Amino acid sequence: MSSVEASLAGPKRPQDRVALGDVPKAFAASGELEVNHLQRQRQPVDYTLNGHHYSLPDGAVAIAAITSCTNTSNPSVLMAAGLLAKKPSNAACSRSRG
């Protein structure tokens, strides 16, 4: 138990574990690999959604997922997750307004 440490699954496969302390370095490295053929967006992307203004800087991470290996292999669970996500206010969920 003394060797257990917090980690992040990914960046591409759940079994690719990244120690929490190494996440910033791994994130930067994976971003460079993914966009090395594109010009990086240095300016924030501004947008308005439902009357609220948002600004996403380069490197921002937006997560919109309900994940689990069993969820992705079980169509009825996927459907239930989609229906739940469709009406988050009914499930007492909220979006951070940053």
Image (tube, rainbow, N blue to C red):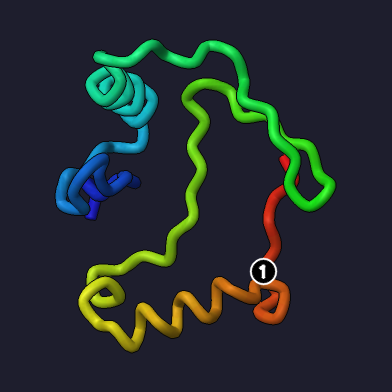
Question: What amino acid is labelled 1 in the image?
Answer: Cys
Report the residue marked by disc 1: 93
At horizontal 65% and vertical 79% (from top left) the residue drawn is 91
Tag 1 secondary structure: loop
Nearer to the camera, 94 or 9: 94
Question: Relative to 32, does residue 73 appear above or below in the rendering?
Answer: below
Quadrant location of the C terminus in the rendered image: top right
Residue 5 point in image, percent of width and height: 30, 45
Residue 78 point in image, percent of width and height: 36, 78
Nearer to the camera, 19 or 96: 96
At horizontal 68% and vertical 28% (from top left) the residue drawn is 46
At horizontal 30% and vertical 68% (from top left) the residue drawn is 68
Nearer to the camera, 5 or 77: 77
At horizontal 23% and vertical 69% (from top left) the residue drawn is 69
User: In this image, 23 relative to 49: left or right?
Assistant: left
Residue 63 point in image, percent of width and height: 48, 49
User: In this image, 46 relative to 19: left or right?
Assistant: right
